[in-house]
């Protein structure tokens, strides 16, 4: 599985005109012929890219800097990776492994809680968090890299969450017709938002609140008729009027 994933990354992350730039998104024409990559060289290159990214951000992880730190030639890197951002992405995928799956026998709500907490742990980790932020930054100016991030990072993890939500629909735990993508967005957007803007991560209490809020919003037993807000407002007005101080009756003056 892992070997196939890495091969796909090399195929998907296409190159541009091959110009050697000074940023983390510089690309070169990869040559993937001849002997396979040395495991030792690969590990050194991926480790060097991760160290440079954590220390100085995406701009610090240039091909030249990676080659120097890993003690390999630029030609070696050019032969096996189409861009320095692709190296960072490969290291990120190595670090986090496959999409998160809850333990067998978990309820739908327990599975969602497990996946959200595991995702938060990845995003707040001092190694994987900065790597993901760097890859996302590189994707903004590299459509091929953006596609690789979607295909190898985002889509598999969304698919795992979608499977849990469909199971919940099938079992009648949440309303039929619930937009699964909207629920996934509601769950995972806050952790990503806090990572990308360097905000404090959600603590355990905040994660509990997020899970409970989203689950209540889509749970079948909590479905309210569309007139409920208006009825509630009318009752509130009536209740407040019942507690007003009584007013003196106004008598009509006799003529």
Image: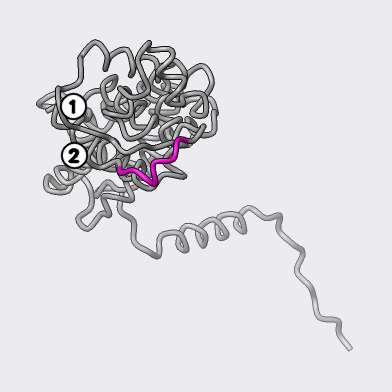
x and y percentages locating residue 21 in the rendered image = 49, 35
Q: Is the residue under label 2 in contact with that under label 1 (CB below 8 Å)?
A: yes
Indicate yes or no whether the magenta region holds residue 19.
Answer: yes
* Residue, far right: 255
The residue wearing badge 1 is 102
Q: Is residue 44 left or right of residue 193?
A: left
- 143, above or below 35, in the image: below
Q: Is residue 163 visible from the viewing direction of this image? A: yes
The residue wearing badge 2 is 164
Q: Which picture quadrant has residue 13?
A: top left
Q: Is 160 or 245 nearer to us in this picture?
A: 160
Residues drawn in magenta = 14-20
- 68, above or below 1, in the image: above
**Residue at 45% across, 35% down:** 20
Sequence-first tag of 1 and 2: 1
Q: What kind of element bears circle 1?
A: loop
């Amino acid at each position: 599985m892992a070997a196939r994933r890495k091969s796909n990354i090399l195929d998907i992350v296409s190159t541009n005109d091959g110009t050697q730039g000074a940023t983390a998104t510089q690309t070169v024409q990869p040559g993937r012929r001849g002997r396979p990559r040395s495991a030792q060289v690969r590990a050194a290159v991926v480790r060097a890219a991760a160290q440079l990214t954590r220390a100085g951000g995406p701009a610090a992880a240039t091909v030249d800097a990676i080659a120097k730190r890993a003690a390999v030639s630029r030609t070696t890197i050019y032969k096996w990776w189409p861009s320095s951002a692709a190296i960072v992405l490969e290291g990120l995928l190595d670090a986090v492994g496959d999409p998160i799956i809850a333990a067998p026998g978990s309820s739908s709500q327990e599975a969602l809680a497990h996946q959200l907490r595991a995702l938060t742990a990845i995003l707040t980790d001092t190694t994987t968090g900065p790597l993901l932020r760097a890859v996302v930054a590189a994707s903004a100016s590299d459509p091929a890299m953006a596609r690789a991030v979607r295909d190898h990072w985002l889509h598999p993890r969304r698919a795992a969450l979608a499977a849990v939500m469909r199971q919940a629909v099938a079992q009648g735990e949440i309303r039929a017709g619930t937009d699964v993508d909207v629920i996934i967005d509601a769950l995972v957007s806050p952790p990503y938002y806090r990572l990308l803007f360097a905000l404090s991560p959600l603590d355990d209490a905040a994660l509990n609140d997020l899970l409970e809020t989203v689950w209540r919003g889509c749970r079948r037993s909590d479905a309210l008729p569309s007139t409920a807000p208006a009825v509630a407002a009318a009752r509130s007005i009536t209740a407040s009027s019942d507690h007003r101080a009584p007013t003196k009756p106004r008598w009509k003056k006799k003529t």
